[in-house]
Image: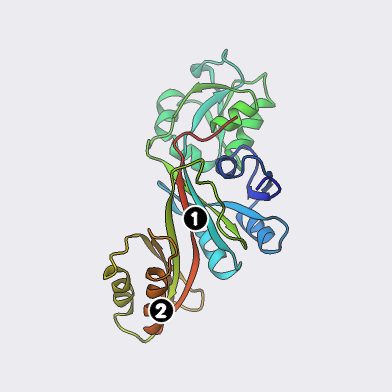
Amino acid sequence: MGNATVGFLGPENTFTEMAARELFEHSRRQPFSTISDCMDAVAHGDIDYGVVPLENTIEGSVNLTLDYLIHQTPLSIVTEITIPIQQHFVTYDHSRKLENIQAVYSHPQAIAQCHHFLKEYVPNAKIHYMDSTASAAEFVQQHPEENFAAICNELAAQTLDLYIAEKNVHDYKNNHTRFVTLSHSGAIDATEQHDVDYKTTFLVTLPSDYPGALHQVLSAFSWRRLNLSKIESRPMKTGLGRYCFIIDVMQGMDETMIPGVKAEIEALGCSVEILGSYPCFTINTPKVK
């Protein structure tokens, strides 16, 4: 995949780029300012793959990714990767002491995720919100004369040669984000690099006048003993009370089970689309070099 062009939710040195680096280390990577811009670029054939966030342990699903995938772009999920969200407190160099920090810069979510650390160790510092953790780190790097700090990941700190004054300052130690790779093509092969599971994602729309339809849909998975890792409703955007369902199954595409589920649900009068059947990776220590 060295010749592939991979888009990701930018800017550079964000957690999304860390996810993209894990799967496309030797490919050309291109940042996009929004999730929709990245997905549109894949849909229009400007790039080969797009890496975008799908779900965070603390914040929940990224609705923009889900809704754009459902309503706007005919793309497939070809890979999922989960990485830890490790936020660090960084300064320009080692000479800056916590008690002298005057201002802290970061993305609003990162600030919220580090609330207890900020309250205890830099309670008098002014908080400034930035578009990303990477842009916060860049701001600190551009102001070496000030006692500023940023909350960012290790990739941003290392790339900008900033000093990590305190590691892992986030409140929740089990904070992870799932990222998906979207494409018109088939699944990528990274099984040599990572332990892998397989998942299939269904998009199911129920008939409007069918009582008990959701129960029967779930029964199609249950009697086959297929493990559902997630079920989530999203509005159809066609009227109040109209929803579709995203269902994740811990099973890759095969010749019988997944096609059988799809056929049974369709026989109930439901609309069924498979958004992807793909490998899933979990990374405990993302690459930063």
Which residue is depicted at the point 51% across and 42% down? 192
Observer-nearest of 115 and 75: 75
Q: Hey, which residue is sitting farthest front in the picture?
A: 255
Q: Hey, which residue is sitting farthest bottom in the picture?
A: 209
Look at the numbered disc 1 and give the secondary structure of its residue.
loop
Q: Do the residues labelled 1 and 2 touch (CB within 8 Å)?
A: no
Q: Distance between the residues labelled 1 and 2?
A: 29 Å
Above-or-below relation of 106 to 266: above
Which residue is depicted at the point 57% across and 53% down? 188
Bin the neighbour count of mark 1 within 10 Å (Cα to Cα): few under 14, some 14-19, many 20 and up.
some
Q: Where is residue 258 in the image (x, y as percent from the top left)?
A: 40, 69
- What's the residue type where badge 1 is placed? Val
Which residue is depicted at the point 56% across and 63% down? 76
Which residue is depicted at the point 29% across and 75% down? 215
Q: Position of residue 134 (x, y in %)?
A: 61, 36
**Quadrant assignment, res 184:** bottom right
Q: Position of residue 36 (x, y in %)?
A: 62, 58
Mark in the foreground, 1 or 2: 2
Q: Mark 2 = which residue?
A: 263
Q: Position of residue 7 (x, y in %)?
A: 66, 50
Left/right of residue 229 with respect to residue 281 in the rendered view: left
Task: Tell me which numbered mark, 1 or 2, is placed earlier along the sequence.
Answer: 1
Q: Mark 1 = which residue?
A: 62
Observer-nearest of 262 and 68: 262
- What's the residue type where badge 2 is placed? Ala
Q: How is the image coloured?
A: rainbow
Q: Hey, which residue is sitting farthest right in the picture?
A: 46
Look at the numbered disc 2 and give the secondary structure of its residue.
helix
